[in-house]
Amino acid sequence: MSQTLTLRRPDDWHLHLRDGAMLRAVLPETTRHFGRAIIMPNLVPPVVTGADARAYRDRIMAALPQGTDFTPLMTLYLTEETDPEDVAAAHASGLISAVKLYPAGATTNSASGVRDFDKVRGVLEKMAEIGLPLCVHGEVTDPEVDIFDREAVFIDRVLDPVRRATPGLRVVMEHITTANGVDYVKANDRDLGATITTHHLIINRNHILVGGIKPHYYCLPVAKRETHRLALRAAATSGDARFFLGTDSAPHTDALKENACGCAGCFTATNTLSILAHAFEQDGALDRLEGFTSLNGPAFYGLPANEARLTLTKTDAAVTYPDKIATDDGPVTVFDPGFALHWSVS
């Protein structure tokens, strides 16, 4: 017996593609299922100007598999030297879809991020004026704040004051990991949305630490308590249009993950849709999967939903995915949800 579910082609509203050999290896894992993706700008060096974004987009397009219908939605990396007029020009030309805020030191390649928010006030005001969204990595980097509390503290110390000081600024709280994040989105019905990753719907902090350290479950923001995971599941499956999929799929080679100071990131591009179908079915919400993956994100960004469709099919036999993706830099481990997958994509 089989069961099918047809969806508009999904989009990924938070994706890392890296560059060079890694880009060429992992891009097909996204383009196989997704029509568009918000591309993260934290390269080395970062994508900070319109010219940088144009060059990076050109490299992505050159790496696309032949016959692929995929649109990279480019972003700029916000620094304390970002020029508001360069941002406005890149937006007006259709080159960029958002600007990304990394608090300095919060995650991978974030050293060029923001320390003094007064220095980016002009950029944020220009973005509010032109309707350009700000994508936020929502963690403080204060060493006095416990890593499991950094998202909640960021909301109080940084995000809410910035939003109050910049009326009309459209904000995406990326990869929320806490009930605090869910509650903050629900309490604000204008100009605020949130992405939720595949892996944060599946794992809590016990999965990383119990029975030995699991480096391929380590990500930033780090997974939290089970109560927070359940809050994310409830938000994702609720049908609330303020929540949408951003996988934060982040490839690192095994050599960089499995060492004394392993990199943060889960690579989920390959099997995300099968995992999500499992989770939404488990929560009795298959009828809301299309909203989360394919409708809510475009609505927030003011874009039409994709016209193309894909079909998910559930069978008794388990679906197999590769354990690793080969790259010229070394293998990248595909996220293991810890259970058999029975939904496949066609």
Image: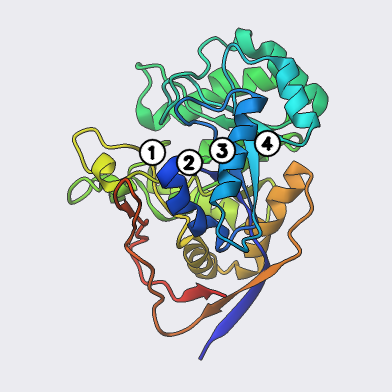
Q: Residues within 10 Å of mark 3 (few under 14, many from 20)?
A: many
Kindly check if marks 3 and 4 are in contact, taking CB atoms under 8 A apart as contact: no
Q: Quadrant of residue 258?
A: top left
**Marks 3/4: CA distance?**
17 Å
Kindly check if marks 2 and 1 are in contact, taking CB atoms under 8 A apart as contact: yes
Disc 1 residue type? Val
Q: Nearer the viewer, mark 3 or mark 4?
A: 3
**Marks 1/3: CA distance?**
13 Å
Q: Nearer the viewer, mark 4 or mark 2?
A: 2
Q: Residue at x 61, y 40 (%)?
A: 57
Q: Is residue 191 left or right of residue 41?
A: right
**Marks 4/2: CA distance?**
17 Å
Disc 4 residue type? Ala
Residue indicated by mark 4 = 187
Disc 3 residue type? Glu
Kindly check if marks 2 and 3 are in contact, taking CB atoms under 8 A apart as contact: no
Of the numbered discs 4 and 2, the one sitting upstream in the chain is 2
Q: Quadrant of the C terminus?
A: bottom right
Closer to the camera in the image, 49 or 345 = 49
Residue indicated by mark 1 = 222
Residue indicated by mark 2 = 177
Disc 2 residue type? Thr
Name the spot of residue 195 as percent of width and height, x first. Answer: 58, 44
Closer to the camera in the image, 89 or 315 = 89
Residue indicated by mark 3 = 174
* Element class at badge 1: loop
